[in-house]
Image (cartoon, grey):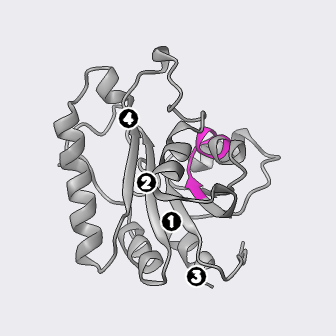
Amino acid sequence: MIHSYNPVKSDIILDRDGVINIDSDEYVKSSDEWIPIDGSINAIAALHKAGHRVFVATNQSGIGRGYFSLNTLTSMHDKLHQLVNKEGGFITDIAFCPHSPDDECACRKPKPGLLTELSSKHNIQLNNTIVVGDSLRDLEAAFDVDAKAILVLTGKGKKTQQSNPNLNVPTFENLYDAAQAILA
């Protein structure tokens, strides 16, 4: 499905696990386990080179659950930054929620706290922002702030699509395809 966007350069907020890197039901717990999905690094670089600011907003309850430390998360994000920079791209910022679902925080998606945090910090107009995710909670956070939601079928995307047949959002096989449509 091709969907064109306003030629004004949008800010783009990506979910991480299942959109940029391979997700795991056992959690991605180290930089060695953090493996990019084919084409995702090139997609981020292409978006940046075209003048979009790229951000990441990610739930990381593995910290709250004690599966990995903040230092380990930092090393995963360092790896992401290095790979994107090597391709000529740049990620402006990464916002993450370290809490477990039981913490009832304001930042864990589907709540919009990560998006509003990025908006406040970087003067993002969320109603002119594209949010790319693979789960319903990513899309719900986008809807909550009137952002434009895109679903990718990597990670939990196919399950999200099957469980929500009336979901009316642009849908793409992966981040690379979504980026090509945004850039078209």
Disc 1 + disc 3, Cβ < 8 Å: no
Pointer 2: what residue? 56
Which of marks 1 and 4 precedes in the sequence? 4
Question: Which quadrant is home to the C terminus?
Answer: bottom right
Q: Is residue 63 left or right of residue 48?
A: left
The residues tagged by marks 1 and 3 sit, at their Cα atoms, a distance apart of 12 Å
What is the three-letter code of the residue carrying label 4?
Gln
Q: Nearer the viewer, mark 1 or mark 2?
A: 2
Percent x, y of residue 159: 61, 43
Toward the viewer: 153 or 121? 121
What is the three-letter code of the residue carrying label 2?
Val
Q: Is residue 6 left or right of residue 176?
A: right
**133 within the magenta span:** yes
Give the residues in magenta: 131-140
Toward the viewer: 148 or 40? 148
> Which corner quadrant of the image does residue 88 belong to?
bottom left
Which of marks 3 and 4 precedes in the sequence? 4
What is the three-letter code of the residue carrying label 1?
Leu
> Which corner quadrant of the image does residue 63 belong to?
top left
The residues tagged by marks 3 and 2 sit, at their Cα atoms, a distance apart of 19 Å
Local crowd size for mark 4, using a 10 Å CA cut-off: few (<14), some (14–19), many (≥20): many
Specify the label residue 5 is tagged with. none
| Residue shown at 71% from the left, 46% from the top | 143
Specify the label residue 183 is tagged with. 3
Pointer 4: what residue? 60
| Residue shown at 70% from the left, 42% from the top | 144
Pointer 1: what residue? 175
What is the three-letter code of the residue carrying label 3?
Leu
